[in-house]
């Protein structure tokens, strides 16, 4: 029988976090009384540099592990995982997440029951319990980007004028349509990917999730945030020591998204406007970081796993007839 869900995890030197991630994923979900497989696939972009492949194969032999010939980047590696998958539903999941059965089951139920939904994400919470703001976003305007980079969005989180980038004026615990969700947790159906296409391979690490959300939306599919369920996102353990390079890469990748989708005719004037705007955002953001200091990844420990699955592999869990509230 076809798996109900395929979970694709792209790892890069993720030895310290990937086991907690795969252990938080159920092996099956019960669909109308029939246990259907949930398959997990790990693509190791670090080519086993830190022993991730060996660890998963030893400690989680039920997980399929693939090691590409080179570092493919986030999007291409997810695409590779997709081609190895068989599930009706597809979940692109970061290795620095701790899931739980309730959140996975809820998202599977909704995306199967509501065909107009193309992508769905629960609320992502950081290790300290704070919300990961990137799990629900608008497609930001130049003004939205300036408000975020300058700190206006943070200073006025309930303002629809200043806080549109991360939509912080909307209720955390409810569900609604958004412009984009985070690549750390993106669930969809196979038929949607067949219609819209996979991740754009020209994006190496950042920007690919935003690009995919724009393409899904333009194909008439809804991007949904559902804050009634949550998972843990340890966020950036693999790149925590490369904050400045990561920040530059994010700005550059998002600029590439804008040049792709919002300058279809290749206007030099429009391209100049976006390059100027993103350059300004980057400078302001770096200035703020140098003045206020950066928040590190300290305090993230293994015991965060108890907020997810408790480190135990989950068995068959029934799909209920209605979504929890």
Image (cartoon, grey):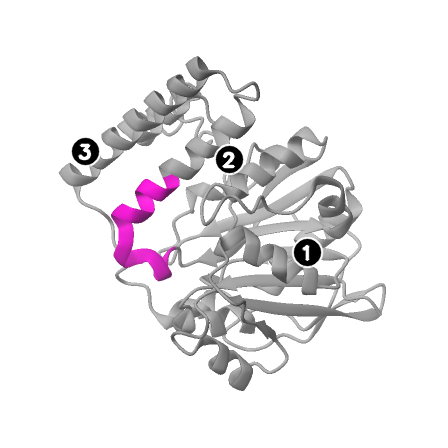
Crowding at dot 2, Cα within 10 Å, few <14 / some 14-19 / many 20+, comes out as few
Pointer 1 with pointer 3, Cβ within 8 A: no
Q: Splitting the image into 4 quarters, where does residue 28 fall?
A: bottom right
Which residue bears the numbered disc 3?
287
Check residue 114 for magenta coloring: no
Spatial CA span between label 1 and label 2 = 27 Å
- In the rendered image, the vertical position of residue 318 relative to residue 252, given as above or below: below
- Residue at 43% x, 64% y: name it: 12
Secondary structure under the numbered disc 3 in the rendered image: helix
Pointer 1 or 2: first along the chain: 1
**What percent of the width, then of the height, locates residue 248?**
31, 41
Check residue 249 for magenta coloring: yes
Of residues 141 and 232, the one nearer the viewer is: 141
- Magenta segment: 236-250
Of residues 211 and 129, the one nearer the viewer is: 211
- Residue at 56% x, 47% y: name it: 201
**What percent of the width, then of the height, locates residue 301?**
33, 69
Which residue bears the numbered disc 2?
171
**What percent of the width, then of the height, locates residue 145?**
38, 26
- In the rendered image, the vertical position of residue 223 relative to residue 204, given as above or below: above
For residue 90, the mark is: 1
For residue 235, the mark is: none
Q: Splitting the image into 4 quarters, where does residue 88 fall?
A: bottom right
The image shows a total of numbered marks equal to 3
């Amino acid at each position: 029988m076809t798996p109900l869900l395929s979970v694709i995890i792209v790892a890069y030197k993720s030895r310290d976090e990937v086991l907690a991630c795969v252990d938080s994923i159920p092996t099956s979900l019960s669909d109308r009384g029939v246990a259907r497989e949930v398959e997990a696939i790990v693509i190791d972009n670090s080519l086993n540099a830190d022993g991730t492949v060996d660890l998963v194969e030893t400690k989680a032999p039920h997980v399929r592990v693939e090691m590409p010939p080179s570092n493919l980047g986030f999007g291409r590696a997810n695409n590779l995982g997709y081609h190895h998958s068989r599930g009706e539903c597809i979940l692109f999941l970061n290795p620095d997440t701790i899931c739980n059965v309730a959140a996975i089951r809820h998202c599977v139920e909704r995306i199967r029951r509501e065909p107009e939904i193309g992508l769905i994400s629960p609320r992502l919470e950081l290790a300290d319990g704070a919300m990961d703001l990137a799990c629900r976003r608008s497609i930001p305007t130049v003004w939205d980007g300036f408000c975020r980079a300058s700190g206006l969005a943070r200073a006025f989180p309930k303002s629809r004028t200043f806080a549109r980038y991360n939509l912080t004026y909307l209720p955390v615990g409810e569900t609604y349509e958004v412009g984009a969700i985070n690549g750390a947790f993106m669930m969809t159906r196979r038929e949607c990917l067949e219609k819209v296409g996979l991740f754009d391979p020209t994006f190496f690490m950042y920007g690919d999730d935003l690009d995919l959300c724009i393409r899904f939306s333009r194909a008439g599919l809804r991007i949904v945030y559902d804050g009634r369920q949550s998972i843990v996102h340890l966020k950036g353990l693999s790149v925590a020591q490369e904050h400045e390079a990561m920040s530059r890469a994010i700005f550059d990748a998002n600029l590439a998204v804008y040049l792709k989708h919002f300058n279809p005719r290749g206007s030099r004037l429009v391209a100049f406007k976006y390059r100027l705007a993103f350059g300004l955002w980057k400078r302001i953001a770096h200035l703020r970081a140098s003045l206020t200091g950066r928040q590190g990844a300290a305090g993230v420990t293994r015991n965060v796993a108890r907020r997810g699955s408790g480190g135990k592999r989950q068995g068959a869990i029934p799909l209920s007839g209605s979504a929890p509230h």
